[in-house]
Amino acid sequence: MEKLNEVTRGLMVERFGGDSVISLATVDGGKPVVRSVNGHYSDGSFYVITHALSNKMRQIAVCPSVAICGDWFTAAGEGENIGSVGAPENAAMLAELRAAFSEWIDNGHTDFSDPNTCILRVRLRSGTLFSHGTRYDIDFSA
């Protein structure tokens, strides 16, 4: 396994640096639960706008180990609620997410006035990326 490097970083940004539909798996009562979410990759993590009271966030609070899959990439990581979209410390990430999700972000589905509308960060630990016939086993830890 190799550390995230210039080549794999570039491939990750190219493939997932916008709006990407990915599968997110959590654990509930010892059983896997998977769903599709809109995710955005940035600096070794995927970010998702969600609701703090959703099942996925409830499950992550109990067991933060998660897995993701999408577009010839699979990974394991740790999920964490980094807080409300309205929190000042999340302003830069919210701006990045607004740009990435611009096609749908203001369609009325996301209530930015709700303090429970939050940002889920999936901090990647390890993953496997396939690109043009090459397999990259990536260690995302710093």
Image (cartoon, helix red, strand yellow):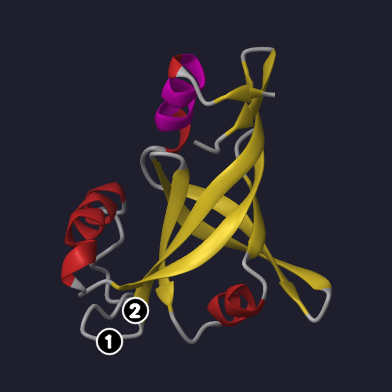
Nearest the camera: 130 or 61? 61
Q: Please give the residue where the numbered disc 2 appears in the rendered image.
A: 117
Please tell me whether mark 2 sits on a helix, a strand or a loop: strand
Quick check: is 12 in the magenta stretch?
yes
What span is in magenta? 7-14
Q: Please give the residue where the numbered disc 1 appears in the rendered image.
A: 114
Mark 1–mark 2 CB contact (< 8 Å): yes
Please tell me whether mark 1 sits on a helix, a strand or a loop: loop
Residue at image x 51%, y 55%?
122
> Is residue 73 visible in the rendered structure shown here?
no
Where is the N terminus found, in terms of image quarters?
top right
> Is residue 67 visible in the rendered structure shown here?
yes
Q: Quadrant of residue 24?
A: bottom right
- State the image coordinates of residue 74 (x, y, percent, origin top left): 67, 41
Q: Which residue is most to the right?
A: 30
- State the image coordinates of residue 39 (x, y, percent, origin top left): 45, 53
For badge 2, the amino acid type reads Thr
- Identify whether 125 is placed above or below 95: above
- Identify whether 20 is placed above or below 54: above
